[in-house]
Image: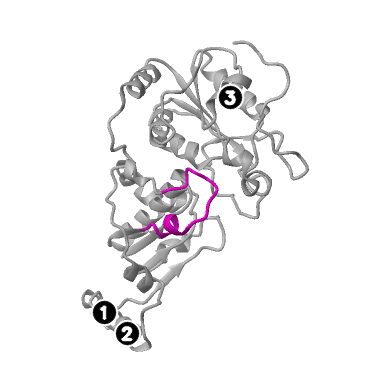
Amino acid sequence: MIITRLFCGLGNQMFQYAAGLALAHRRRTVLKLDVSWFHEKNSEAAHESYSLSCFNITEQFATDDELDRHRGLQLNRSEMWAGRIARKVGLARYAHLLPLGGHWHIPSTFAFDPRFFDLPDGTLLDGSFQSEKFFTPVADLLRSHLSFRYPLTPAVAAMAARIASGPSIAVHFRRGDTVFMKNYNREGMGVLQSDYYETAIGRIRERWPGATLYLFSDDIDLIEREFHPSGPHVFVKVTQPWNAYDELRLMSLCDHFVIANSTFSWWAAWLGASPGKMVVCPEPWFANSRHDARDVLPERWLRIGRGTITSPEQPVVPRVFSGPSREP
């Protein structure tokens, strides 16, 4: 059994699930989900709740006893040695009858470590695993798991048809927590500014000048007031705040992508199935962080300097864009 500990929002949970699926597949064993964080957390972010039920995954949740066992909290010395000896002498098929002993894996860095695939059966994964390198061996299987479970609402279906009607570019603006929560804005992610988006959109439109921009955000009304791109564009407002998966689904239907420094739009771009898709992403991924983000962005994606970064000396204000608005 492999257990993966889930925490934070939907995009983060998708990375954690993907890594768990890859390791469980490698070990030919079952994957179970640890959702205890959502019962114990004291988070300011309203979106941080268990969210994977929107996908066609097999939801098997780890029990408290299984979590303790994988953390090595229930085993005495004799039980641990019995399990190890059974596997050593070729009795692995009987070893599952004995306590396995805990292996609680907490990675020391965000960067990919190829030794990840050497982790044994009986591992509890407790990390972010924000790189496709952790799940490349099961990419096709993962896509089937991350297909959407729920039917489209009429409004979402109409927008999906509109997106499918011609060349499309999904543009994602991450607001909310990156602005109003100190640990995201000043000490972690930072807020992307208008120069990043103008440059990124310009690069894609060099190749597809007539493509329609579909603009997505967790504060779409603010973006509509302050960002006025040239050419055809649509501010997407058909999704309900509590159905974030519909926004992810619509974004993934687009042909090309301008993503924010957000795991949410990262996954929309990765799930996008358009042949020859172009993905533009910000670099660096983190504004001010100790995390090693070298493996977050796939090498095939086009990296653009993120422009002005909100720093600890700058006030945290709702406004993203400055200067005169440009009419479409």
N-term mark: 3 or 1: 1
**Outermost residue toward the right in this view:** 313
Q: Is residue 95 above or below residue 160?
A: below
Q: Is 324 part of what is drawn in magenta?
A: no
Residues at circles 1 and 2 in contact by the CB criterion of under 8 Å: yes
Q: Which residue is at a point 39% across and 27% down the rendered structure image? A: 253
Residues at circles 3 and 1 in contact by the CB criterion of under 8 Å: no
Q: Which residue is tagged 1? A: 98
> Where the C terminus falls, by quadrant?
top right
Q: Which residue is tagged 2? A: 79
Tell me which corner region of the image, top left, top right, bottom left or bottom right, holds residue 157. Answer: top left
Kind of residue sitting beneath label 3: Ile
Kind of residue sitting beneath label 2: Glu
Q: Which residue is at a point 69% across and 34% down the rendered structure image? A: 317
> Is residue 275 something that shows in the picture?
no
Pair 3/2: label in front: 3
Q: Residues within 10 Å of mark 1 (few under 14, many from 20)?
A: some
N-term mark: 1 or 2: 2
Specify start and end residues of the magenta stretch as a single range: 34-49
Residues at circles 3 and 2 in contact by the CB criterion of under 8 Å: no
N-term mark: 3 or 2: 2
> Is residue 202 something that shows in the picture?
yes
Spot occupied by residue 211 in the image (x, y as percentages of width and height): 49, 16
Q: Which residue is tagged 3? A: 223
Q: Is residue 295 left or right of residue 63?
A: right
The Cα–Cα distance between marks 1 and 2, rounded to whole angstroms, is 7 Å
The Cα–Cα distance between marks 3 and 1, rounded to whole angstroms, is 57 Å
